[in-house]
Image (tube, grey):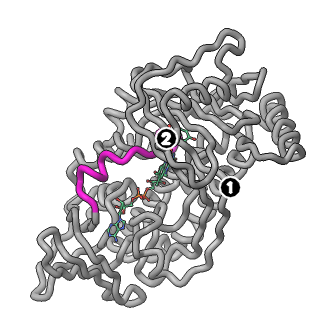
Amino acid sequence: MPVAPRYELADGMRTQVAIIGAGPAGLLLAHLLTRGGVDSVVLETRSQEYVASRIRAGILEQSSVDLLTSVGLGDRLRAEGHEHRGIYLQWPGSRHHLDFVDLTGRTVWVYGQTEVQKDLVAAGTADVRYEVAEVALHDVETDRPYVTYLDREGNQQRLAADAIAGCDGSFGPSRNAVPAETFERTYPYSWLGILADVAPSTDELIYAWHPSGFALHSMRSPTVSRLYLQVPNGTDPASWSDDRIWAELALRLGHGQDGWKLTPGPITDKSVLPMRSYVQTPMRHGNLFLAGDAAHIVPPTGAKGLNLAIADVTLLSAALISQFREKSSVLADSYSDTALRRVWRCTHFSWWMTTMLHTGDDPFDAQLQLSQLRWVTSSSAGATGLAENYAGLPIGF
Ligand code: FAD
Ligand code: DHB
């Protein structure tokens, strides 16, 4: 579909949608708008290389894969990504496989956020201005919102738009431009995440409850593993030697249990990730729309952050295309409520997975967690609930 023309004005540039942030939400939104014939410009504070190399999420839900495939972004994903039927849940002495295909007919895919980002850049559908500074939003409650910023050369710029999409994550300026009610939960633990040049020791992800703390065995490819350990808040990654990390992973993941072995390898990246639940409502103020981490944060245990960002911009692009091409504001007016239904479902699921699997020093909590794990792995009702949420409900649910 032809994209509406872009105008150069005497006092700056005009586009239909000014998008703040070139993470997965911002770049995918630009891609979907371009396909729908709506013009956009994306502003990003970081360099293209920095954004492309940030190691973050690794699991795509079925509906994210279907969406990416339907908009021409599925070729490398389907060739190089890995489809998983389910996950393992375990605690000392027991490992159980939950088969999402048997339970819900849906699968998940291992495909890193870095790869999704590369595919979006390769599509060439987004006009991104990287390394901008001092991004400020103006008059968002009017029909003439605009953004001011310093370009890469340090020149003051003005970008006028019909709508602004705040896709600038949890530290960007967009969320503060929406008068909102906020809901928040912090957790008394973080994740120490590593990337290692070693073949995964498992065919599908292992989520492990252990008295010493939660551990997760994930992966990126047949030669690269991604693993996580629950650690106290404020942990310095440098205080964990490679040997200590592998020893703790072996303990928590059950090395030796029923003959299973964890193979260690060279660690290429080590970082600590704090955990938080946060939701801001509404996700719209006038002509400013929030999407992705700009509106909500989930703890990573349910693998939902990236998938929620994809779901948000799928809804938002449809709303903006309908507003600009069909002059209908129905979808734009319902965007916040529709998106928030899924946001709260994923917020609950992420909180539930997190609190079921992370251990503390309360023995009562530990017994409740083990009881819940036994139920989820032995009752088809319990297993189906987890599978339906993990593999993902349809976009628009
Ligand atoms: P982001 O990816 O944060 O993108 C926002 C973009 O806006 C960034 O490129 C940023 O540089 C830019 N920006 C910020 N301020 C400005 C500004 N003033 N002007 C212009 N641009 C700006 N999820 C999982 O499911 N599993 C995981 O393992 C996982 N690990 C994570 C690890 C870390 C360290 C973090 C921070 C998140 C992790 N997540 C994980 C969450 C997942 O990566 C996010 O949910 C996802 O990146 C959201 O995409 P987004 O585009 O909304 O936000
Ligand atoms: C990964 C991260 C998660 O938070 C998760 O639940 C599963 C996998 C990952 O980085 O591979």
Q: Measured along the vertical axis of the image, is residue 122 above or below residue 312?
A: above
Q: Is residue 45 within the magenta segment?
A: no
The answer to which of 194 and 325 lies nearer the viewer is 194
Q: Is residue 381 visible?
A: no
The residue shown at (44%, 68%) is 171
Where, by quadrant of the figure, is residue 202 drawn?
A: top right
Q: Report which quarter residue 151 is drawn in.
A: bottom left
Asked whether residue 108 appears in the rendered view, the answer is yes
Looking at the picture, which amino acid does disc 2 mark? Leu
Is 64 in front, or is 197?
Answer: 197
Q: Which residues are magenta?
A: 46-63
Q: Who's the residue at 66% across and 34% down the image?
A: 104
Residue 60 image label: 2
- Place of residue 370 in the rendered image (x, y in percent of width and height, measured from the top left): 83, 36
Q: What residue is rendered at 46% in x and 28% in y?
A: 225
Report the side of 38 relative to 219 (left or right): left
Pick whichever of labels 2 and 1 is earlier in the sequence. Answer: 2
Q: Position of residue 4 (x, y in %)?
A: 20, 69
Disc number at residue 260? none
**Left or right of 61 in this view: 105:** right
Residue 57: x %, y % from top left: 47, 44
Q: Which mark is in front, 2 or 1?
A: 1
Position of residue 128 relative to residue 76, above or below, is below
Q: Closer to the camera, 55 or 168?
A: 55
Give the residue number, with chain letter if any, for mark 1: 188
Residue at x 42%, y 78% (from the top left corner): 288
Q: Is residue 27 above or below residue 323?
A: above
Q: Secondary structure at mark 1?
A: strand
